[in-house]
Image (tube, rainbow, N blue to C red):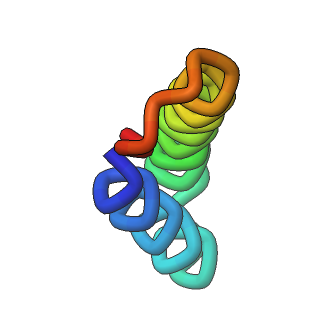
Amino acid sequence: MLKWTVVFVVLAIIAAVFGFGGIAAGAAGIAKVLFFIFLALVVISLLTGNKKIV
């Protein structure tokens, strides 16, 4: 999951550099969603005492 988050963040940065507003906004939105999902899974994993993080 973290891999996809990094991919979309990089895509958002590249799109922002080239000035494609719609693409940059879409990629940044997806990156934010994936980041918060990953963060929630890590917190849940730590709270349940699961040694295997995501």
Quadrant in the picture for residue 47: top right
Q: Nearer the viewer, residue 5 or 39?
A: 39
Residue that appears at 51% across and 36% down: 38
Q: Quadrant of the image for the N terminus? A: top left
Residue that appears at 57% across and 74% down: 13
How many labels were placed on the picture? 0
Residue that appears at 57% across and 35% down: 42
Q: Nearer the viewer, residue 9 or 14?
A: 9
Can I make out residue 26 in this image?
A: no
Q: Nearer the viewer, residue 30 or 40?
A: 40
Can I make out residue 45 in this image?
A: yes
Q: Quadrant of the image for the C terminus? A: top left
Quadrant in the picture for residue 8: bottom left
x, y percentage for residue 35? 58, 41
x, y percentage for residue 5? 43, 52
25 sits left or right of 41 in the view? right
Above or below: residue 45 compared with residue 48: below
x, y percentage for residue 6? 44, 65
x, y percentage for residue 20? 51, 62
15 sits left or right of 4 in the view? right
Q: Nearer the viewer, residue 14 or 22?
A: 14
